[in-house]
Amino acid sequence: MNRSGAISAHIVLVLLGLLFVIPLVWGISASLHTNATIFLNPFQWLPHPAHWSNFTKAWSSQSFGRYMWNSFFIAFAITIFCVIFSQMAGYGLSQFKFFGRDVIFGTIVSTLLLPFPAIMVPVFIFTKDMGWINTFAGVIVPGIITAHAVFFMRQYLSGLPSELLWSARIDGASEWTVYWRIVVPLTGPVVAAVGVLTFVASWNNLLWPLIVIQSKGHYTIPLGLSNFNDTYFTNYVAMMAMSMVAVIPVIILFLFVRRWLINSLMVSGGGIKG
């Protein structure tokens, strides 16, 4: 690429980056407004005065410390289980040949076309029959493995050189040793990618916790935010203030694993090269 082409590409990337950042900047600015000024036209990007007390008032109006812990516990548990189970499933579907393997994988991929509301009723009936309504298990168990995670893991592990695994087996390693000592260490980037995507999806999930959770002691952050909206009044600035607080753990997580996440996305098309 010549110099002018590189400059044009950088300008396009900067503009796209600004496009994705604008909603976050708007949210921060809106959280410092009042309910009377938040929808002024044109929008006041630098509110004067800035109402920093919106954060303390919104935080103290509900048990957001409890909601934050509940969200973290649920998202962390779902992420751990989803990574473990999808890694095992992806390894089996990519490295072992058995009758019906392609049918099983095709069935898993086909479920990617189903929106969650289409399977929501049978999942709810299963959860109810298990006695998990208004429990953390009712929120966690239906999300411990997803078709997206299995597909991502399988595609990544398809590039794992079989010679590496067979050399370990010839040296006397058991299947568990091969998996734990060779496969797991090589899946760091894809584990980071699946983990981040699963954690963010669980952290932001509103629909399923709204159906399963009934008591405020089990509320998550999205359910707490919905409490700012009632029939006669919506406290927009409080909602935006707590939304900005809820974004902080996700940003920290992304900054912590961003290198692995980018590497995983770069090699996911070709898998691991031996």
Image (tube, rainbow, N blue to C red):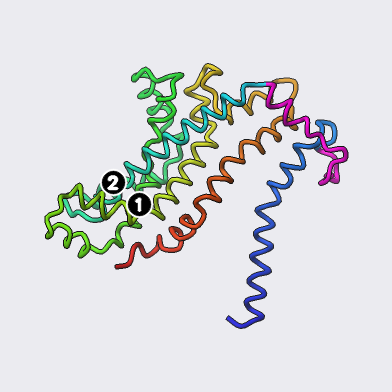
Q: Residue at x 22, y 50 (%)?
A: 101
Relative placement, left or right, of 247 versus 115 is right
Mark 1 Cα shell of 10 Å, populated few (<14), some (14-19), many (≥20): many
Give residue 158's quadrant in the image. bottom left
Q: Give the mark nearest the N terminus, 1 or 2.
A: 2
Asked whether 242 falls inside the magenta stretch, the response is no
Q: Residue 153, labelled with which disc?
A: 1
Q: Position of residue 74 (x, y in %)?
A: 46, 31
Q: Main secondary structure of the magenta part?
A: loop
Asked whether 53 falls inside the magenta stretch, the response is yes
Q: Position of residue 97 (x, y in %)?
A: 18, 54
Q: Residue 203, labelled with which disc?
A: none
Q: Residue 89, labelled with which disc?
A: 2
Relative placement, left or right, of 229 versus 198 is right
Q: Are marks 1 and 2 in contact (CB under 8 Å)?
A: yes
Give residue 108's quadrant in the image. top left
Q: Which residues are magenta?
A: 39-61
Question: Relative to 240, is 269 above or below?
Answer: below
What is the three-letter code of the residue carrying label 2? Answer: Ala
Element type at marker 1?
helix
Relative placement, left or right, of 39 versus 115 is right
